Image (cartoon, rainbow, N blue to C red):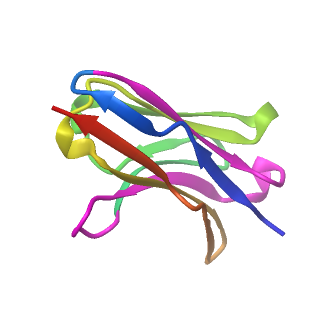
Amino acid sequence: QVQVVESGGGLVQTGGSLRLSCTVSVNIFEFNAIGWYRQAPGRQREAIADVNLSGRINYADSREGRFIISRDTTKNTVYLQMNSLKPEDTAVYYCKASVLSRGYWGQGTQVTVSS
């Protein structure tokens, strides 16, 4: 059974940084893509970035270059480095591992940025 586990969230001040981790329970190369999403209170879930099987990275928008996605295939883990955090980045951050038309979601990790 596929498990997707996020970690690394927490409370940080404006301008601070966090690195989120997404670890999958099977070989990372079993997935077509693994991506990060977030959902703020009262808002729809939105895509942030993903990395595909070949390692190609796609960002949903620029976010001024503050967010960087990467992966460590030896650890079956995808990271999201978040810098210069703003209060509007406060949200639950989710990871999704996709294979063909099926997506496996993690439980999410809360990120709170204080002003």
Q: Residue at 26%, 30% (x, y): give it.
A: 85
Magenta run includes residue 19? yes
Q: Is residue 31 above or below residue 64?
A: below
Residue 106 position by quadrant: bottom right
Query: How many marks do you count on the picture?
Result: 0
40 displayed left or right of 80: left
Residue 105 image offset from top left, x and y in percent: 59, 66
Magenta run includes residue 33? yes
Query: Foreground: 57 or 78?
Result: 78
Q: In the image, which residues are magenta?
A: 16-45
| Observer able to see residue 66 | no
Residue 80 image offset from top left, x and y in percent: 48, 36
Query: Foreground: 101 or 23?
Result: 23
13 displayed left or right of 97: left
Residue 81 position by quadrant: top left
Q: Is residue 102 above or below residue 49?
A: below
